[in-house]
Amino acid sequence: MKRRSYAATTLALLALAAGAGASTPADPLESPMWEAHAKLLFGNDPVRFDPRVKVDFPQIAENQRSFPVAIDARAIPGVRRIVLMADLNPIPIAVDYRPTDSEAYLATRIKLDQRTPVRGAVQLASGEWLVSGGWIDAAGGGCSTPPVSRVKGDWADHLGEIRGEAWPVAGPVAASRLRLNFRHPMDTGLVDAIPTYHLERLTVSDGAGRELGRMEIWASVAEDPAITLIPHAAAGDMLAVDARDTNGRDYHAALAVARQSPLPR
């Protein structure tokens, strides 16, 4: 018994030592914030850059308040988590998504406060992180200007409205492309006299209440969030959407996957 305990303790100490000595790989984008963000997000988990993590976005931000980004890691088996981040934003993480029973895909729109690297990071079942991304030219101010609905003054009239549609997509597993639109100001707290107020959680479930995916959301997601996911649901299946914002307000919606021929992946 003592020998087994000693061996187990030795292995644990060796594992801790290996973790403590783990180094963050050099950033091909040479971001000044890479080391700080990597240590905070990845800890001692192994990290490497991998072009199979497809991060798609326009090369120039025409609208720094609403910049489209898609992360597609469907070519990588065993993805358990997807993080969307912009290094030089005051709120760097936008979405932390766990595709419980969904394809490894996420698309949304984010705010950009200046020229910055935008990255997708995916974690595998092994704990390893794979990262990709690129620099985006942006005029800036996306996080520190008031939302359009605040300027117009009609944000409260539409708060909580949800629109959603889902279409089956072709593939070896039954899946659907789910597009959600929320009406919400997504206040960052960086505008005078407007406190932080944003969606913070979202869950997608099937008709029986089984979780298909869940995410944490930060204020760097654009006003009136548009989110696209690919849950494992077939034509005719019911999907339930549940969300909550930082004021404790709950949002609920239900929709059926369209009964039509599958769309291409």
Image: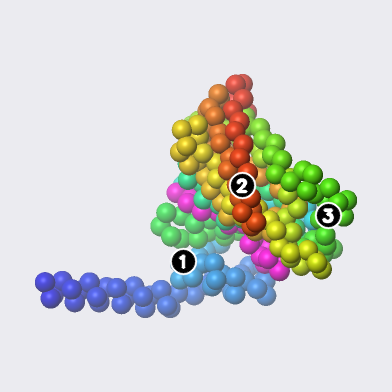
Q: Which mark is drawn over residue 250?
A: 2
> Does 120 lie within the magenta span?
no
What residue is pinned by disc 1? 46
Question: Label 2 neighbourhood size at 10 Å, few (<14), some (14-19), many (20+)?
Answer: some
* Residue occupying image coordinates x 84% and y 47%: 154
Query: In this picture, is 175 found above or below 109?
Result: above
Task: Give residue 150's mark.
Answer: 3
Residue shown at 12% from the left, 76% from the top: 2
Residue 182, how many percent across, how many down?
70, 44
- Stretch in magenta: 78-94
Single out the residue that lies furthest toward the right: 152
Residue 40 occupies quadrant: bottom right
Label 3 sits on a secondary structure element that is helix
Q: In which image quadrant can residue 257 be found? A: top right
Sequence-wise, the earlier of marks 1 and 2 is: 1
Which residue is drawn at the image coordinates 70% and 36% (left, top)? 163
